[in-house]
Image (cartoon, rainbow, N blue to C red):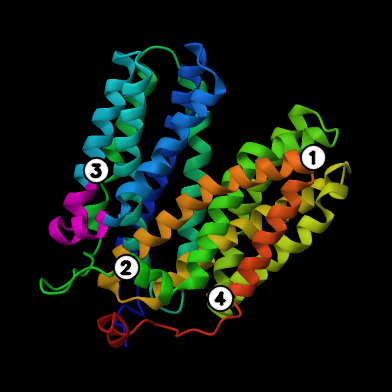
Amino acid sequence: MASNANPVPDIRSLAAVIATAAIIGVGNSMQPPLISIRLEEAGLSTGWNGLLAAMPSMAILAVGACFPIALKRHGPLFTFYACTALAILCLLIFPFTDSYWIWALLRLVMGATLGLQWVISESWINSLAAGPRHGTILGLYVAVFSAGLAVGPFLLSLIGTTGYLSFVVCAGIYAVCGLPLPLAQKMKKLPDHQRPLPLGTVLRLAPAENIGSFVNGATWGSLLALFPLYAMHLGRGSDDALRFVTAMCVGSLISQPLIGRAIDRLSPRRVLMATGMVQILISLVLATAVVSNLGAWPLLLAWGASIGGIYTASLTGLGTRFPEADLPAASTAFTMVWEAGALAGPLFIGVAMLGWDPHGLAVITGLLGAVLSLACLRPGKVTATVEDISNQ
């Protein structure tokens, strides 16, 4: 069986990796709106802005298959620092050019480097969290990362988007994100003779977890972009529409400790199935709740909790299915699937809303919840064994 279990997680190691994730969250939520606002101020259309925003996902999908090879060759710590340095360099170049295509190239490079940085973070925390409190620890990890995401836009509002300062501050945030990592227990590496798991093998051994990743990416990516329009088409004002998105983010944040405990007491797959069923139920009453002054808020808090639960349960389940040395390959596939969902979700929901305005959003999100719930019905091994992997 896989030997990634450690019944007594090292507190110092956990603190180091979780602190790193929190700082990454600040940077990751600060630089996208900064770049988008600078493009808007330069007079570019939302279409060009949206294309630039898609560059990181495209980069991860294009080169993500190389991530496990890079990690095996150079190790997680060196790779993390190299990715961080390259992302910082790209950030500092942005304000020195007005060329859209240079900005697009910089976003592609940053997408790949920050994507690999995130794969390392996910793999590391999953290897450390193994044990009876796996879900609780990952719930804390996701909650702290979410808190970091909330800080980035607020910090940007304080320092402004003009000039060089905002880029320098964001680069400084990335510069310190990896400082705690040398305090963490090192991850196990693959033996020299063993190749990283093919991504197709990861998808086959953990189908429900990767479907959960796709559903999470598709749902979050769509709701952040399109849910305000959905609410406005139902007659709510723009201020209410934006507050609804905030309510979903708050629901995801505050629910993580309870979700983590539920995962530990039940199982990642059962919690994953429950989150899919909640999404189905919410999609059925969404329009009625949104037009209500009181009903919208508890429903959206619950929806945010279920969406956050999809991610936490999927990530926890991933950690139970692969040996520690194979977690980088597993996390790479998981991240690539998430990015595919984040690209596909807004596209399909946007088309659905054109065909049935605005209820197409509820229809597609409900279908995503149904697909997730059905995927969890498929029986599967609790852990991927060495024999499973060697037979591929």
Cβ atoms under marks 2 and 4 closer than 8 Å:
no
Q: Quadrant of the N terminus?
A: bottom left
Provide the secondary structure element on which disc 2 rests.
helix
Q: Give the range drawn in magenta.
A: 66-80
The residue singled out by tag 3 in the image is 83
The residue singled out by tag 2 in the image is 327
The residue singled out by tag 4 in the image is 269
* Residue drawn at the location 29% of the way across and 43% of the way down: 113
Q: In which quarter of the image is the C terminus?
A: bottom left
* N-term-proximal mark, 2 vs 4: 4
> Closer to the observer: label 1 or label 3?
1
The answer to whether residue 79 is magenta is yes
Amino acid type indicated by mark 3: Cys
Amino acid type indicated by mark 4: Arg
* Residue drawn at the location 56% of the way across and 56% of the way down: 216
The residue singled out by tag 1 in the image is 357
Q: Which of 230 and 304 is in front in this view?
A: 230
